[in-house]
Image (cartoon, rainbow, N blue to C red):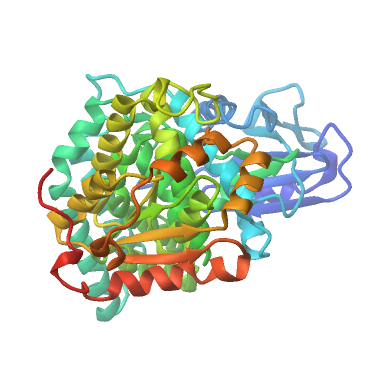
Amino acid sequence: MDALAAALADPQCYPHAAAEIEVLETHISWVLLAGDFAYKVKKPVRLPFLDFSTLEARRRFCEEELRLNRRTAPGLYLAVVPVVRTAAGLRVEAPGEPVEYAVKMRRFAHGALAAERARAGALGAAEVDEIAVALARFHAAAPRAAAASAWGEGAAIVRRALANFDEIAALAPSAGPQRAGRLARLRAWSAEEAARLDALFAARRAQGFVRECHGDLHLANIAFVDGRPLAFDCIEFDPDLRWIDVMSETAFLYMDLLAHGLEALGWRALNRWLEESGDYAGVALLRFYAVYRAMVRAKVAVLGGREPAFEAYVALAERLARAGAPALVLMHGLPGSGKTRTAGLLAERLGAVRIRSDVERKRLFGLAPLARAAAAPGEGIYEAQATERTYARLACLAGGVLDAGFPAIVDAAFARRAQRDRLRREALARAVPCAIAACETPVELLRERLARRRGDASDAGIEVLEHQLATRDRLAADEEAIAVHLDTTGEAALARAPELLAARLSAPPADASGRAPAAG
């Protein structure tokens, strides 16, 4: 342990009660847990990606850390305080000439980190939803990069991505030829993918998706405090790593959930963020940024001498870089038949992007997802022209997801044959599999469910149910050829849905009549 950190392990250094000091170390800082508080001291180091070598730099970056982290965790970040050398030894928050600076934080309990919860099997769907929603709202409020700035330029993005490989090689020069070959292939893939995405990087920057983000949003930098997830320890030492595309940040969360073996929760987090933000265009960047973030963590593992973690992140990057298997699933069923719940389950288990018509319809008309439209069937945002706009948007978003190489699940009623055909043409145009997930529940149970429905984006009640019962277009023979009928009355039957859909999507088409019409 460094002499400074060892000295600060003395409880007498602090102006408050601290029976025992716990010292945590990273490659760039020490964190001293003292009573009800935590003090973060930056190491006097110079690395390829940061320079803390002078006291003035460390003070400045402490102040920047305080400012930035108060955006997401104001209750945790309290002050920047001096460390002073006195006749009695080092003292924190004492008068005198500072020999060091520390960021003073409110201490949270052991086990509060999302990473700790993940390892303990205690990170669930509700917690992941809260993280994803909080992240989307943070991004929505974050400042956007000025048009004249260089942040978010394609050249800078590829330079950062490739620098990870160069820095890993410099940190571990004695790696064998097998590792070198794996890293060389990932490096080449990253360069090729960045070149392919260059125009999209520019478009995203022009459209305002490069914002002042957190920059290091993995599960060990999210804590549950007072029942809420708080992101902390953001990137303060390099604005280039913080002024990034919001999808780069979201991909970090997605990737780290996968790295913890929580694949279903990774897809849940991504879909919840997409639903909240509406940024489905960003899915085209997901694979590139997820690989980039995996290699960031691989580099950190090398810095910490954690060889198993390094190998795991490289293996994950290799898996994420493989070409996807796009497919299209259309949900189908009456109101209350469990389409949305089933679509969520399918998205998590099959690894797909879900697009929900109830949310996108309201987004088109400037309404929040849970806002009540107060419109009868065929009126207001549910009149024919509004419905046409909604299905056009669903087709556009689904096409973009398929083009990005991911399966898309479109969660809508699809009560009309023409609506189903419109989406099926998106799959046909790309020669990808398409299936219809038909959710089926007895009408009496549908009425019971709708009578109990609260706090959902869907406005459909019993009146809408009766309307659809009378007017819907039932599946035709060619649609039945690609349909999977799902019993959504109970948990046991629902649990088989992913397996049944996967089998349908992997099966060859029954015959030519199972293809959607090419026009109309």
Give the number of callouts.
0
User: Residue sitting at 68 percent across and 64 percent down?
Assistant: 120
Does the rendering let one see residue 256?
Answer: no
User: Residue sitting at 28 percent across and 30 percent down?
Assistant: 389
Question: Which sits in the foreground, 501 or 207?
Answer: 501
User: Residue sitting at 39 percent across and 21 percent down?
Assistant: 365
- The picture places residue 228, in percent across and down from the top left corner, at 68, 38
Does the rendering let one see residue 151?
Answer: yes
User: Residue sitting at 46 percent across and 54 percent down?
Assistant: 343
Residue 296, compared with residue 150, is above or below; it is: below
- The picture places residue 169, in percent across and down from the top left corner, at 29, 64
- The picture places residue 388, in percent across and down from the top left corner, at 28, 32
Residue positioned most to the front: 470
- Horizontal side of 29 relative to 139 (left or right) equals right
- Horizontal side of 318 relative to 84 (left or right) equals left
Residue positioned most to the left: 519
In the rendered image, which quarter is residue 88 located in? top right
Quadrant location, the N terminus: bottom right
- Horizontal side of 56 relative to 329 (left or right) equals right
Question: Which sits in the foreground, 159 or 456?
Answer: 456
- The picture places residue 307, in percent across and down from the top left corner, at 46, 72
